[in-house]
Image (cartoon, helix red, strand yellow):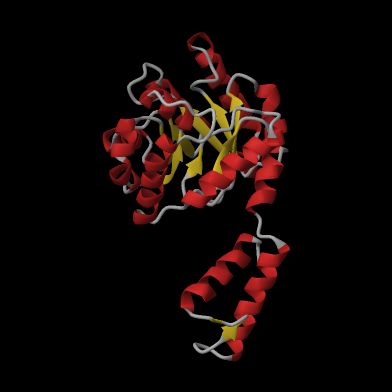
């Protein structure tokens, strides 16, 4: 399986097989082959066939980086989507419009080994997030901000205060369940990098640690923004050096180096791959 700490999840319509290789080459940590919103009801069967055909010729590494966004558990397409995962041997599913633990259980009754990314897009989903995060097989929570805003009749031309409570609920639910930080929703403005980075910064301040992408050009700016700055890396190295020289009693730049500071320094270096 790909790392559960992926930073970027890039959507590709499941019926556009010619785009799969480009998505995998984009540098995105995970590629989401979409069977839900990006595919009309009339082309969902063709999309499942396209994913199955791709999977048959894909390498293990490519398959490990793929997540399939399947239709919600109440959909007439749900059973066929699960059939695709089983027959293609794909191990990760993003379950659209997840609202209850029973929906996750319904998936695992058919495919007990599949990792689930619960895509939460409604008030009901937020209300059940703490329970769903603790379900066996759930790897991560994902915030579907556009559909959530629609559910609550919010205008999110800018990041709305109406999203704050729901976003915080997902962060807390993830932490209580021992999951990685949740995945922030999409930025639909493809050619607006400042907006993309502003959306990411807003989510990061709340505790999100990854983001959904809808175009390959969004991937690199997100990775760059999430990487620790040279100044942060220098600070982290100096903290660890000071702690090693005087464990439990170190000072740096006039500040005591206690355990939380040491752990933050270690985390900063880990984020940079050190």
- In percent of width and height, residue 249 lies at 51, 89
- In percent of width and height, residue 218 lies at 67, 37
- In percent of width and height, residue 143 lies at 45, 37
Image position of 202 (left or right of 130):
right
Q: In front: 69, or 177?
A: 177
* Quarter of the view holding residue 52: top right
Query: Residue at the spot x=63%, y=72% of the render?
Result: 236
Query: Residue at the spot x=49%, y=39% of the render?
Result: 91
Q: In front: 151, or 252?
A: 252
Query: Residue at the spot x=35%, y=46% of the render?
Result: 133
* Quarter of the picture holding the C terminus: bottom right
Q: In the image, is residue 33 above or below residue 2?
A: above
Number of numbered tags placed on the structure image: 0
- In percent of width and height, residue 7 lies at 59, 47
Query: Residue at the spot x=42%, y=41% of the render?
Result: 164
Q: In the image, is residue 149 above or below residue 197?
A: above
């Amino acid at each position: 399986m790909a790392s559960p700490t992926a930073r970027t999840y890039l959507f590709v319509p499941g019926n556009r097989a010619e785009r799969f290789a480009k998505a995998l080459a984009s540098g995105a940590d995970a590629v989401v082959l979409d069977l839900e919103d990006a595919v009309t009801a009339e082309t969902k069967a063709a999309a499942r066939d396209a994913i199955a055909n791709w999977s048959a010729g894909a390498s293990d590494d490519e398959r490990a980086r793929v997540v399939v966004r399947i239709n919600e558990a109440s959909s007439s397409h749900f059973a066929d989507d699960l059939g695709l995962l089983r027959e293609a041997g794909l191990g990760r599913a993003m379950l659209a419009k997840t609202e209850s633990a029973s929906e996750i259980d319904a998936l695992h009754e058919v495919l007990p080994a599949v990792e689930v990314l619960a895509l939460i897009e409604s008030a009901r989903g937020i209300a059940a997030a703490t329970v769903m995060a603790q379900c066996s097989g759930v790897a991560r929570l994902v915030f579907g901000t556009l559909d959530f805003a629609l559910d609550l009749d919010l205008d999110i031309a800018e990041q709305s205060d109406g999203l704050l409570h729901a976003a915080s609920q997902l962060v807390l639910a993830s932490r209580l369940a021992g999951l990685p930080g949740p995945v922030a929703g999409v930025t639909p403005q493809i050619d607006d990098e400042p907006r993309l980075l502003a959306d990411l910064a807003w989510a990061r301040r709340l505790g999100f640690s990854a983001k959904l992408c809808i175009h390959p050009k969004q991937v690199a700016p997100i990775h760059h923004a999430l990487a620790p700055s040279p100044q942060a890396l220098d600070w982290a190295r100096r903290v660890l050096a000071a702690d090693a020289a005087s464990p439990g009693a170190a000072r740096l730049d006039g500040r005591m180096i206690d355990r939380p500071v040491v752990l933050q320094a270690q985390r900063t270096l880990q984020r940079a791959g050190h």
